[in-house]
Amino acid sequence: MKNTAKTVGIVMIIMVISRFLSMISTIIYSTYFGNTLEMNIFSYALQFPNLVFMIFGTALATVIIPIFAGNMDTGKKDRAFKFADNVITLSTLFTICLVILGIILAPLFPLLTEYKTEGYDFAVLALRILFPIMIFYAINYILQGILQSSGKFNMPAFVSVPSSLIVIGYVFFLGDKFGVKGLLIASLIGLSTQALILIPPIFKTEYRYKPSFDYKNEDIKRAIRLMIPVMIGTSAYQLNMFFNVTITANFENTVMIFVLVQNLVLNAVLAFIYSVTAVVYPKFSMLAAKGNMEEFKNTLITVLSSIVYFLIPATVGFILLREELISLLVGWGRITADDESLASVILALYAAGITGVGIKEIIDRAFYSLKDTKKPAIIGIIVMGTNIAVSLTLINFIGVYGIPLGNAISTLLGASILIYLLRRKIGAFGAEKLIKKVFKIVFSSLIMAGTVLSVVLAISNFNLGHIFLDKFIKLFAPVTIGALTYFAATYFLKVDETLDALSKIKKKLSIHKSH
């Protein structure tokens, strides 16, 4: 576990930097161009390649790792490489077909939104420019799977850094000249690099790609059988996101703000979650393959504990400091006070479901490593159905705010059902102990909330006369004091994660003093 924790730590740092840059690029182009019709269309169009490849790409990565790693671990290197050759060839051909189909059908998609009247031509153009990203997404996910199976986690975590820098560079140097149309091209070029930068690290492994179209290959058949339910499960979550954005596109000038907030929340949360799952999923797969269920359960409960330890107080923080966070991050340029107000409420409602997202990602991978892809798929469909039903009901009462609230409710429901089903499959794995810990964490988070509100109130009239510094202090003062309060509360309640962290700090300090 020590080596795993160290690897997770390194990957998490890279992932945080990567996600942070991605967030910064989104903030820069959003505040630079503002909440205009073209920017709303850009935000909407970008969801299409993201939708298809979060479904197909995630399924690819999920299936490739166990099969490729399994063959490598059992000494079947040639078989593993042949499998990779087939996956790359078949997936690339499949995505080329999807791109062609998407370009042909592009005139139909805007008809589902308000863009069927205003901005229709630009919406069709945006879709046709962005669809080819799917080809590179496919290669990206496959190469990530090969590298992670080979124990190389750093570059897969780094992939979005160049694409973010390309978009940021475009805005600063060419944004005035080419506008949002140029941003479409910059996004296409930038997102394409996510696959291209993984080619050099692949050459540092033994694998060398050789075109192969053997769709009857035993491992390919197995991969397809496994992928179908994974795609169903993954598609449910992604279709939720797509449904949310499409419904939002029927409210005037809300898509850009909605997607911006969605990205802010997801970048913050998924940087943590995916750095954990990237390392833990291969470990789950290895333990399950060896039949070592005791260690499997220990690893599972340790990871779940870490998830709730960080995400529950993060939820409280997002909700309480929503206005300060939005003001600091996007309260610039052409973003108006009304845009900020809309964004802060959406942020709070989205944040309510982030613990559910974290738990779901971990439990899904536990099921996948046990070769059970059906249950996550079924739950994914239930989550999607719940999200649609609740969102459509709530928008009649609270308008666009019903969409993120419906998403939060459905996500938490899905996570709860998955925990129950996993317990039925593998027996008790410490869920009762986890529930006790959750109560301690919630109580600590409430103490933290009281402290945060007091600090916010105390510095509400604070003014140095420098806009950025004032916004920075009004966010980071309560964040810092709140974090210290949470740490202290969990220490007195003897929460393992806090005690372990404190023990490591004391150990490092004693080593430092001895030198």
Image: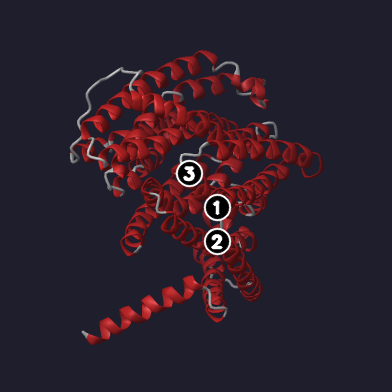
Give the structural element (helix, strand or loop) at label 1: helix
Could you tell me residue 114's position as x and y percent?
68, 26
The residue at the point 34 percent across, 42 percent down is 159
Label 2 amino acid?
Val
Q: What is the CA distance from the residue labelled 3 to the residue labelled 1?
A: 26 Å
How far across and down, in percent of the image, does residue 209 sit? 23, 27
Residue behind mark 3: 26
**108 or 331: which is nearer to us?**
108
What residue is at 54 percent from the left and 18 percent from the top? Answer: 106
User: Is residue 297 in view from this perspective?
Assistant: yes
Per the model, the C-alpha gap separating discs 2 and 3 is 28 Å
Give the class, few, some or many, for how many residues have Cα within 10 Å of label 1's Cα (few <14, many ≥20).
Answer: many
Instruction: Tell me the crowding category of disc 2: few under 14, some 14 to 19, or many 20 or more residues within 10 angstroms, Cα based.
Output: many
Query: What residue is shown with label 1?
Result: 359
Identify the amino acid type marked 3.
Thr
| Extreme residue toward the right, this view | 397
